[in-house]
Image: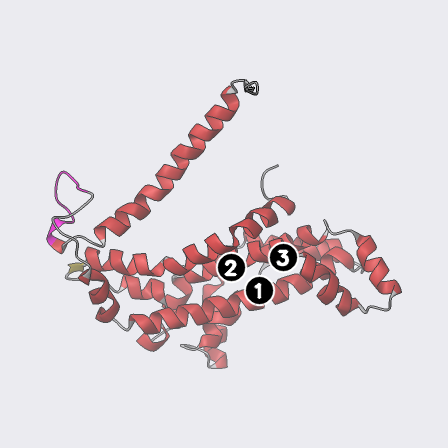
Amino acid sequence: MELPRKNYPFSFKKTLNYTLLTAAGILFIVPLLWMAATSLKPSNEIFTMPPKWFGSHVEWTNYFKAWDYFPFLRFYINTIIVSLSTVVLVLLTSSLAAYAFARMRFKGRDMLFLLYLGTLMIPGQVTIVPLFILMKYLGWVDTYQALILPGAFSAFGTFLLRQFFLTIPVELEEAARIDGCSRFGLYWRILLPLSGPGLAALGIFTFIGQWNNFLWPLIITNTDSMKTLPLGIAMFQSQSGTQWHLMMAASSIAIIPTLIVFICAQKYFIKGITMTGMGGR
């Protein structure tokens, strides 16, 4: 006996949403596909008219040339060190500050939180000169400290985790306090283990931001041994012209870690954004 088929009513709104999302997805993915296709073309076929997705043959050697043209491995290692170190520090400092603003009661807490959030309205370019002077005074120019520490504190991260902490029932902490748990124990043993999605969301934001950071490393580094990937990719541009095939190959190599991080943590990322109220719902 055949089961009756369910007739799902047509929803114009849902169809429109899916259509717009599909169009937006195509709009975002086409440049990435074009970058990958260009990285495999011979240099003399990149600007052929009309444009073609594929060249006459596949130039896998572009990737080897891009890797060997500059100390690309050094750039890669520097970027990994800076990005991961900054992520760890941001998660630590932001979670501690968020815990204080979400759970601790002290005079002027809300005003201090608003002032801290107000720093988000200050463009980062405004603080570059005094920050560089400070790094020079400390003798940290062209060092890992100068690349990592300025990004170790995040008002956005504090706001994100504070909103997440507010969704965790206070009763859990009260029960732990009855059992003799300390204030730091509440933070370390109760809130942090329950804040995986929020921490993942902040970690992804921070990692991608540091991985793509161009301006600050450009200013604070002097030698190739301390340069990061964005600077290394920009070095394919010179007065004699731009080596587009090598630049696209280098860019394709550079985006691999960010894709891996997002794919592995996308479930927690989406959950963290939704639970902190940033999903627009």
Q: Which dot marks residue 206? A: 2
Q: Is residue 166 left or right of residue 22?
A: right
Magenta-drawn stretch contains 45: yes
The three-letter code of the residue at mark 1 reads Val
**Distance between the alpha carbons at the discs numbered 1 and 2:** 8 Å
The three-letter code of the residue at mark 3 reads Gly
Kindly identify the residue that appears in the image at 26 percent across and 68 percent down: 67
**Mark 2 closeness class: few <14, some 14–19, many ≥20 residues within 10 Å:** many
Residue 221: x percent and y percent? Answer: 37, 73
Q: Earlier in the sequence, mark 1 or mark 3?
A: 1
On the question of residue 130 being in view, the answer is: no
Q: Compared to 111, does 70 lie above or below?
A: below
Viewer-closest of 8 and 12 = 8
Q: Is residue 225 left or right of residue 42?
A: right
Report the magenta residues as a range. Answer: 44-52
Q: Are marks 2 and 3 in contact (CB under 8 Å)?
A: no
Q: Are marks 1 and 2 in contact (CB under 8 Å)?
A: yes
The three-letter code of the residue at mark 2 reads Thr
Kindly identify the residue that appears in the image at 58 percent across and 60 percent down: 154
Q: Quadrant of residue 125?
A: bottom left
Q: Which dot marks residue 90? A: 1
Viewer-closest of 76 and 237 = 76
**Distance between the alpha carbons at the discs numbered 1 and 3:** 15 Å
Q: Which dot marks residue 196? A: 3
Between marks 2 and 3 in the image, the one whose residue lies nearer the viewer: 3
Q: Earlier in the sequence, mark 2 or mark 3?
A: 3
Q: Earlier in the sequence, mark 1 or mark 2?
A: 1
